[in-house]
Amino acid sequence: MSRVLVTGGAGYVGSHVVRALLDAGRNVVVLDDLSKGHRAAVRGAELIVADIADQQVLDRVLRDGAVSAVVHMVALCEVGASMVDPSSYYSQNVARGIGLLDAAVRNRVTRFVFSSTAAVYGDPVQIPIVEDHILRPTNPYGETKLAFERALAWYDRAYGMDHVVLRYFNAAGAHPDGSIGEDHEPESHLIPCLLRAVGKEDEAARIFGNDYPTRDGTCVRDYVHVSDLADAHLLALVAL
């Protein structure tokens, strides 16, 4: 049976995508260096611990693993960190992503789902943001995601790389059975930080920003449940 390669499948969103694929009867192989992900989050799928920059590993997985599609989840994704270290973000999100595309082309894998971000839109000029909203990122994180999106479009034109790009805002929540969820260290996501504060694991949850056009000056955030995101990735594969 052909398999789906999920890069970064041991991470937060990635592990939920893997679970959705397995529940749908898909054969899944995960490629993750475990720098952010967790081995325990990948159950029922083959896990290959490696860096996506390793072309030999990519060739072996794509060629010998009978892979028919790639779901690309690997990324650096902290907006603040991207502002102080754009080099790492261009290296991981663009350069290594291009290497993955090249390996897919070499091995005739032509179905690709890219987990992108709504940060490619930048400051919205209309709410809600529509799909064809102007693309104007305001930070290197969004810029690098957009750069890879554009490369993917050209790879489609040149090499027939059929693809779906999913742009979304903040993922939240956990699998309904409680077996996987947010597990970052250090934790920077708002909802887990609030829960930790309520549970008195930390002294307080910090809220950043006081000059937004809201009643109390704090930011309004849009969230999507991580299981809904996982289902969206599965539907994208079905569409391809």
Image: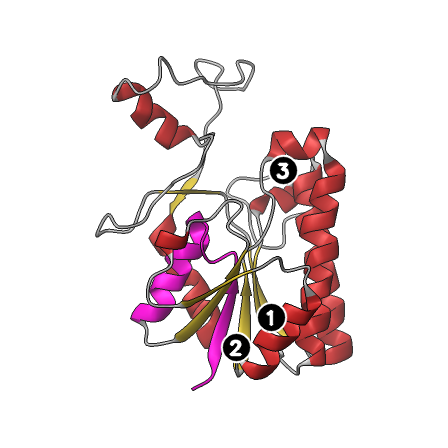
Query: On the image, numbered disc 3 is attached to which residue?
Result: 125
Could you say whether the residue bearing mark 1 is in a helix, strand or loop? Answer: strand
Kind of residue at badge 3 = Val
Is 7 covered by the magenta stretch?
yes
Q: Residue at x 72, y 79 (%)?
A: 106
Q: CA distance from mark 2 to mark 3?
A: 31 Å
Q: Please state the horizontal and vertical placement of residue 184, each as a whole percent of the image.
A: 44, 37
Q: CA distance from mark 3 to mark 1?
A: 27 Å
Q: CA distance from mark 2 to mark 1?
A: 7 Å
- Marks 3 and 1: which is nearer the front? 1
- Marks 2 and 3: which is nearer the front? 2
Q: Please state the horizontal and vertical placement of residue 120, each as a whole percent of the image.
A: 65, 46
On residue 240, the disc is 2
Query: On the image, numbered disc 1 is attached to which residue?
Result: 163
Q: Quadrant of residue 98?
A: bottom right
Tell me whether the residue at label 2 lies in contact with that at label 1, contact meaning CB atoms closer than 8 angstroms.
yes
Is 8 covered by the magenta stretch?
yes
Q: Is residue 29 left or right of residue 94?
A: left
Q: Residue at x 74, y 46 (%)?
A: 90
Kind of residue at badge 1 = His
Could you say whether the residue bearing mark 2 is in a helix, strand or loop? Answer: loop
Residue 17, visible in the rendered structure: yes
Mark earlier in primary sequence (2, 1): 1
Give the total number of marks visible in the rendering.
3
Q: Which region shows up in magenta? A: 1-23
Kind of residue at badge 2 = Leu
Q: Quadrant of residue 110?
A: bottom right
Rendered position, 45 above or below 140: below
- Mark 2: few/some/many CA within 10 Å (<14, 14-19, 20+): few
Q: 146 or 181, which lies in front? A: 181
